[in-house]
């Protein structure tokens, strides 16, 4: 059992504007705390509606040790459930995606309909009430074609996030898209190191030369352009003229902004050129920069006119993180005709491999008993500091709730 007083004492050691104490990146008890206090109480970007195209389509995944799945019902609605049979707890669906008419536990064949109701349990006796043994639901929300799940009994408010993001994201027509590519890799580093790295571009100019071709690595905070403010203002005017919102918008656990790419770049590719001929957004002749949104604790997304890229970092062990990447393109785009898969994916695949090396090296250094948390760069690491502040505040809220429950 995690010593919550110790967790609180560790939080008290953190200096404002600094990285976290060493235990937060290496300690098994802190990792166990994170699973319950952070990931199992947060909204998680599970994927996209186009991945579940028809009745019975489902995706199964694990959220910090909690196996869950999302399924499309007979009525077309998406529902989520804990992936554990109400008999003796076996996992019902294997991790990944598929389709089925009914949900059948592979152990004793207890069978559920797509609404989670138990419809068959052999040899259970006359006094058995099937209606008492439906699957335990989880919260599912959608926003302009993206699917979010939360396993907490009382999830954080979702409506403010959806109300702000949906007008920005709707023009990208995610429901008229398809999944062009998905891959995973495992970083041998704590999930917070992966996310701290993902929230800053302090390292980009030297560590990501390919990304730096298109991405404005010199911006600070939530895309504050400083000396290039005039160019940014002209971009905002141009987006307004073609009916695209830009933001920025942000809440406690999320951010969203549309921003210009570097001069002469239309997409986030190795050469800055459009990767997909069939555009997802035709406004502005495909020259619309990128819509970036991020959510704590695990994801960011970039949506250009031609494709969408999603990055997710989910904890596996105290020193292992699962990185999932997805690329969406227009549903009518033909591989080998309208896009070349390598051209579409190469930039972010390279960036992910470069970040893997950075995070794993970071973990090896943090493992040293001599590690002392240093100060963040207020200009270049503002979003990393925001992430760490959010983590600490969320952890303290959980601890306060535990005290309230006695």
Image (spheres, rainbow, N blue to C red):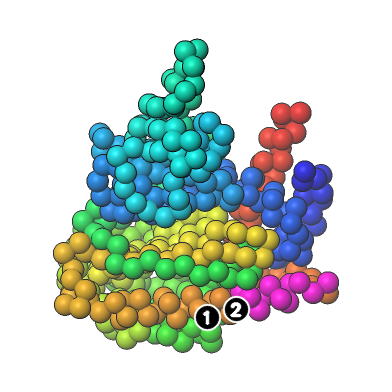
Residue behind mark 2: 358
Of residues 101 and 243, the one drawn nearer to the viewer in this rendering:
101
In magenta stretch: residue 368: yes
| Residue nearest the viewer, comparing 258 with 109 | 109
In the rendered image, which quarter is residue 248 located in?
A: bottom left
Above or below, comparing residue 314 to residue 338 in the picture:
above
- Residue 406 location (% of width, % of height): 76, 28
Highlighted range, magenta: 359-369
Residue 230, horizontal then vertical, whole percent: 36, 74
Q: Give the crowd class for mark 2: few <14, some 14-19, many >=20 residues within 10 Å.
A: some
Which residue does the image show at 49% across and 83% down from the upper left? 208
250 lies left or right of 1: left
Residue 180: in magenta span: no
In this view of the protein, which residue sits in the foreground, 350 or 204?
350
Q: Residue at x 48, y 55 (%)?
A: 295
- Give the mark count: 2
Position of residue 372 measured from the top left corner of the image (x, y, whole percent): 79, 71
- The disc label shown at residue 29, or none: none
Q: Badge 1 is on which residue?
A: 354
Q: Residues within 10 Å of mark 1 (few under 14, many from 20)?
A: some
């Amino acid at each position: 059992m995690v010593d919550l007083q110790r967790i609180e004492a560790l939080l008290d050691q953190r200096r404002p504007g600094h990285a976290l104490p060493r235990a937060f990146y290496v300690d098994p008890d802190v990792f166990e705390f994170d699973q319950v206090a952070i990931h199992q109480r947060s909204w998680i970007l599970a994927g996209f509606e186009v991945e579940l195209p028809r009745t019975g389509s489902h995706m199964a995944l694990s959220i910090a040790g909690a196996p869950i799945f999302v399924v499309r019902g007979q009525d077309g609605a998406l529902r989520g459930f804990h992936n554990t049979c109400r008999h003796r707890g076996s996992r019902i669906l294997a991790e990944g995606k598929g389709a089925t008419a009914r949900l059948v536990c592979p152990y004793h064949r207890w069978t559920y309909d797509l609404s989670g109701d138990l419809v068959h349990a052999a040899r259970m006796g006359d006094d058995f009430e099937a209606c008492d043994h439906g699957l335990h639901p989880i919260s599912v929300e959608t926003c302009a074609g993206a699917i979010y799940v939360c396993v907490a009994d009382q999830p954080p408010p979702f409506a403010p996030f959806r109300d702000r993001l949906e007008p920005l994201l709707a023009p990208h027509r995610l429901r008229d898209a398809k999944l062009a590519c998905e891959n995973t890799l495992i970083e041998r580093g704590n999930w917070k190191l992966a996310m701290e790295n993902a929230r800053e571009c302090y390292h980009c100019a030297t560590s990501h030369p390919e990304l730096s071709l298109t991405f404005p690595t010199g911006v600070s905070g939530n895309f504050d352009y400083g000396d290039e403010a005039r160019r940014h203002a002209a971009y905002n005017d141009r987006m307004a003229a073609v009916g695209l919102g830009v933001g920025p918008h942000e809440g406690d656990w999320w951010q969203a902004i549309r921003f210009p790419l570097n001069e002469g770049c239309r997409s986030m590719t190795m050469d800055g050129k459009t990767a997909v001929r069939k555009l997802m957004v035709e406004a502005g002749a495909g020259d619309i920069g990128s819509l970036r949104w991020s959510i704590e604790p695990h994801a960011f997304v970039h949506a250009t006119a031609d494709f969408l890229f999603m990055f997710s970092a989910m904890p596996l062990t105290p020193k292992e993180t699962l990185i999932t990447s997805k690329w969406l393109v227009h549903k009518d785009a033909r591989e080998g005709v309208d896009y070349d898969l390598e051209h579409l994916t190469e930039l972010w695949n390279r960036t992910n491999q470069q970040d893997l090396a950075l995070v794993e090296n970071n973990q090896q250094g943090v493992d040293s008993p001599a590690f002392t948390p240093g100060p963040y760069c207020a200009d270049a690491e503002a979003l990393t500091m925001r992430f760490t502040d959010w983590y600490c505040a969320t952890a303290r809220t959980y601890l306060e709730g535990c005290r309230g429950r006695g």
